[in-house]
Amino acid sequence: MGTKLAILCGGSGTRIRDVSELVPKPMLPIGNMPILWHIMKIYSHYGVNEFVLALGYKGWKIKEFFLNYKAMTQDVTIEFNGSDTYTFHDDVIERDWKVTLAETGEKAMTGARVWKMRKYLEGDDNFALTYGDGVANVDIQKLMEFHKASGKIGTITGARPSSRFGELVLEDSFITSFNEKPNVSEGWINGGFMMFDAKRIWDYLWPDDNLSLEKEPLSALARDKQLAGYKHDGFWQCMDTMREYEQLNELWQSGKAPWKVWVK
């Protein structure tokens, strides 16, 4: 059994309200496909084809997309002949994908959502976890190997944008402290693209809808020297604002999207 990827898809995207009122943020399109699909394609390129999506705000929109995936992504002929015959004209490239759509609550915080996905994740040795609103050209295979070699419970990918994200203090590939959204940056931020020990992480989580992964759990892992940091100097970008949404779409339309690792 391969590594599963859990994706946090429950946020409402309040900072990008202009374009996210009708759909959850992970469904906002880059080109003609949701950013969620782009994230899944990145991982799939490295052999991760089993996904668990933590649904929340307007989660039915995500269910609708995957339940109608063929119709959404292929040419289709519909014969209105009484029985309504559908003919799909292309093969599904993502035929190896297995997608579990987990209802984790409208208001649950990130730690609570991970806890609610436990039954889908705890049977493996490790699982990957990321946010449903960020893309990067992280080498997922190297990240997984780094996490396994570290022997730590958790690994966070450190990226290098602005200081409005959770700051990591990295010393010799170990995270010595984790601060949520500091005023002063030392250069590395929490870029998502995380890995966790699927058996030991649950000691740092509990069933409380107000539990934020980025506060008590990650801070406790750092204090216990159980949080490794994988440094990524390459491309990384989240989609938090209208400007970032437009920038990602411009990159995609240019044909030079750095995260499009699945097509060389």
Image (cartoon, rainbow, N blue to C red):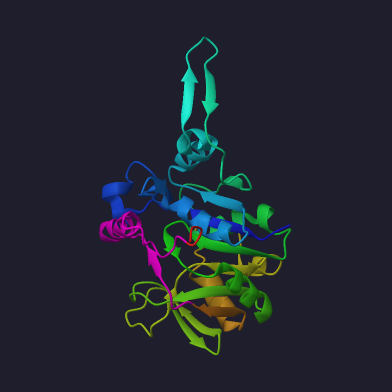
Q: Position of residue 178 (x, y in %)?
A: 48, 79
Pick whichever, 182 or 121, lies toward us.
121
- Please indicate, yes or no, whether residue 209 appears anywhere in the rendered image: no
Pick whichever, 24 or 223, lies toward us.
24
Quadrant that contains the N terminus: bottom right
Q: Is residue 126 above or below residue 21?
A: below
Q: Position of residue 127 (x, y in %)?
A: 64, 63
Q: Is residue 224 above or below residue 48?
A: below
Tell me if 127 is positioned left or right of 244 in this view.
right
Q: How many marks?
A: 0
Residue placed furthest toward the bottom: 172
- Please indicate, yes or no, whether residue 136 appears anywhere in the rendered image: yes
Tell me if 169 is positioned left or right of 103 in this view.
left
Q: Residue at x 48, y 50 (%)?
A: 37
Residue 250 covered by magenta stretch: yes
Residue 220 covered by magenta stretch: no
Q: Quadrant of residue 239?
A: bottom left
Q: Is residue 210 above or below residue 80?
A: below
Tell me if 160 is positioned left or right of 112 in this view.
left
Tell me if 56 is positioned left or right of 161 in this view.
right
Q: Residue at x 39, y 77 (%)?
A: 160
Residue placed furthest toward the top: 82
Q: Position of residue 74 (x, y in %)?
A: 48, 36
Q: Is residue 64 above or below residue 230?
A: above
Pick whichever, 217 or 51, lies toward us.
51
Q: Position of residue 198 (x, y in %)?
A: 68, 65
Residue placed furthest toward the front: 264
Image: magenta residue range: 232-260
Q: Residue at x 41, y 65 (%)?
A: 258
